[in-house]
Image: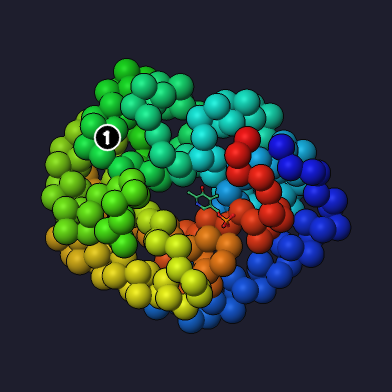
């Protein structure tokens, strides 16, 4: 775990994130400008998370199952999302502990979520993760196969596709990501226009600490921010 952040440090980080966020929202192309600031809380201790929640954060996201389970029941955010790569054999561990799984990156994973959700008598909201840079090493659907994936997965019971999520390639400058965000927004709009049953293109989740303002300018309505809120941390826990 990281060193505990002081309340004062968090307050300063949060206000500078909010300033960037609010400026970017003014430039959002979306008609409905209700844009979600989700705190990516990996390695962040429970007290710090709860402090953030008391002070305005209502969406949090974890990217590892074990860490999510260790904090479950101790954090008090009203909205809990899973945002990391999820192995199919771990779906059962989190199915009743999150309200959305943002990182559905294969048909196999979607089928397992469908199965476990039906077992629990619930409907899980999901986003499909798109590998927008077409990188060999990345999880997610290729842009050209995403529409077909939406069609297939929308036929499964126990899941509702709510939109798309992406982690673009690591670029030298944050401006370089703009073209990937533009590509994602186009895909989001195009698939939404198809009005595929049991799917809605409501959420476009893209943008992290370095580039969330650019993502919002290009149409994101959910950004996932960690470092800019909580400081640099050791990712290898
Ligand atoms: C850690 C993480 C983020 C936040 O990244 P920062 O650069 O720390 O803001 C966003 N999305 C996912 C999936 C993550 O794992």
The residue lying at 68 percent from left, 49 percent from top is 233
Q: Kindly identify the residue that appears in the image at 54 percent across and 76 percent down.
A: 24
Lateral position of residue 188 relative to residue 211, left or right: left
- For label 1, the residue is 110
- Position above or below: 36 against 54: below
The N terminus, quarter of image:
top right
Residue nearest the observer in this picture, 45 or 18: 45
Residue 106: % across, % down:
26, 39
Point 16% across, 59% down: residue: 144
Image coordinates of residue 157 in percent, x first then y, are 22, 31
Judge from the rendering whether residue 223 lies leftward or rightward of residue 185; answer left or right: right
Q: How is the image coloured?
A: rainbow
Horizontal and vertical percent position of residue 42: 61, 42
Foreground of the two, 169 or 141? 169
Between residues 213 and 25, which one lies in front from this camera angle? Answer: 213
In the image: residue 63, left or right of residue 14: left
- Let me know if residue 197 appears in the view: no
């Amino acid at each position: 775990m990281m060193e505990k952040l002081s309340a004062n440090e968090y307050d300063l980080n949060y206000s500078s994130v909010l300033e960037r966020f609010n400026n970017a929202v003014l430039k959002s192309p979306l008609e409905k400008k209700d844009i979600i600031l989700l705190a990516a809380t990996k390695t962040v201790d429970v007290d710090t998370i709860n402090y953030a929640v008391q002070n305005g954060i209502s969406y949090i996201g974890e990217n590892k199952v074990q860490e999510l389970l260790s904090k479950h029941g101790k954090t008090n955010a009203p909205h809990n999302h899973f945002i990391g790569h999820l192995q199919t054999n771990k779906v059962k561990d989190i199915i009743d502990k999150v309200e959305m799984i943002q990182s559905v990156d294969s048909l196999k994973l979607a089928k397992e979520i469908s199965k476990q959700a039906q077992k629990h008598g619930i409907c899980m909201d999901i986003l499909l993760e798109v590998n927008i840079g077409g990188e060999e090493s990345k999880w997610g659907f290729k842009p050209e196969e995403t529409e077909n994936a939406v069609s297939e997965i929308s036929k499964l019971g126990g899941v509702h596709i709510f939109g798309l999520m992406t982690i673009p390639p690591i670029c030298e400058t944050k401006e370089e990501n703009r073209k990937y965000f533009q590509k994602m927004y186009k895909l989001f709009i195009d698939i939404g226009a198809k009005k595929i049953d049991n799917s809605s293109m409501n959420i476009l989740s893209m943008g992290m600490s370095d580039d969330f303002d650019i993502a919002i300018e290009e149409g994101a309505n959910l950004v996932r921010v960690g470092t800019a809120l909580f400081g640099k941390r050791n990712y290898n826990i």
